[in-house]
Image (cartoon, coloured by chain):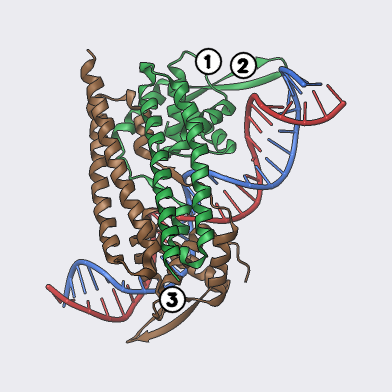
Chain colours: A green, B brown, C red, D blue
Amino acid sequence: MRSDLSTTSYALLGLLVFDGETSSHGLTGYELKQRADRTLRFYWVSPAMSQIYTELGRLTRDGLAEPVDSVRGRRTTRRYRITGAGRDALHDWWGSAETEFPTLKHPVALRLLMAHLRPTDDVLGMLEAYVRQLAIRRSELLAVREGLGDADTLRFPAMVADWGLAYYDFEAQVVSGLADRVRRESSAEV
Amino acid sequence: MRSDLSTTSYALLGLLVFDGETSSHGLTGYELKQRADRTLRFYWVSPAMSQIYTELGRLTRDGLAEPVDSVRGRRTTRRYRITGAGRDALHDWWGSAETEFPTLKHPVALRLLMAHLRPTDDVLGMLEAYVRQLAIRRSELLAVREGLGDADTLRFPAMVADWGLAYYDFEAQVVSGLADRVRRESSAEV
DNA sequence: TGTAGCATGTAAGCCGTTACATGATTGA
DNA sequence: TCAATCATGTAACGGCTTACATGCTACA
């Protein structure tokens, strides 16, 4: 019953709580990974499969989730549901632990910092590649957003998705501007 | 001479290359940590002291940095400089390894996702606390930006800092908007 | 019949943190 | 003289990834 979980544990518990509200009979580890890939990925992390199973084991040990084995053919799959204790733990975590400041690991910014090491074309190439990646991410997130619709139960996930879309737009705009700045300053030289 | 370093290693090597360009006699681990706190922190991570020393040991073993012991009083401090091989390794890394997409760990977004678990005031309190933290971060980064000035040698670090400032402004604006949305939607209920 | 996707786990190992341990120097 | 800051490291451990291992099911 000891509950001193990592934030990632609570994130997974959060996915289980949403599932619990739609009267399903729970999620397999595999399904949980898919949900994480669709949502958590954009503003937290999507843990590896092995990590998912490890966390489900821990949540079960702590009584925060419960497994139900269901047999289908000669195969037994294990579905997990959040428990009452799990709901309580999630609720408490939300309110108690102070909310840490976001952590950003930004390889593009890191490389740009040292861009004087490389010719201008390399720098522009990297920035343009990032803008292309942003467009892909944005379209993936847009699909998620559209899947959420305007249902009241999903208003907060929808807000988070909107936030993410705005963020990708912001990044694309800033990076395009930086690329212009690099182009201008390099042609001004000689 | 084996060089298969983590991105954090290259980030530190990047700090050493900047230092090398200003004809200093190198940096101590302690000073390197201070530089990381002023710059890397905002878009990568600022490693723990113990990590800094570990990385410096590795860079030295690989011939990418070299230590120079200087005695002052009864105290010997060890200053590190980047080597030619270190410069080459950094240059190669910049161009070779494909630039990964940024990773965001955003506890505010994560909590907002599950905001239906808590009363409106808790949600607003969290969002407002984040806006306050953003203002503090912004002012810290602004001080860094002003310290960079308009020198041509520091134009890329300046670009990155400008980007960061714009990002903090974006976040503050979006989160304020979300708070308004939460307020409106909660007063509309009953 | 074969392959892609569903499904579940263990083992090894990296990266990074906190805790621990130690001591010198500077300045109030 | 006392506290803050400078300075350097080791040990233990947590979180997470990749690699490894295994097998079922649906469908082309």
Q: Mark 1 belongs to which subunit? A: A
Residue position for label 1: A25
Residue position for label 2: A70
The answer to whether residue A46 of the structure is visible from this angle is: no
Q: Quadrant of the C terminus of chain A?
A: bottom left
The x and y percentages for residue B129 are: 24, 40
Q: Secondary structure at mark 3?
A: helix
1 and 2 marks on the same chain:
yes
Spatial CA distance of label 1 from label 2 is 10 Å
2 and 3 marks on the same chain:
no
Q: Name the residue at 59% across, 37% down.
A: A50
The answer to whether residue B116 of the structure is visible from this angle is: yes
Reply above or below: A7 against B119: below
The amino acid type found where label 3 is placed reads Gly
Foreground: disc 3 or disc 1: 3
Q: Mark 3 belongs to which subunit? A: B
Residue position for label 3: B20
The amino acid type found where label 2 is placed reads Ser
Q: Name the residue at 31% across, 38% down.
A: A97
Relative to B57, is B163 on the left or the right?
Answer: left
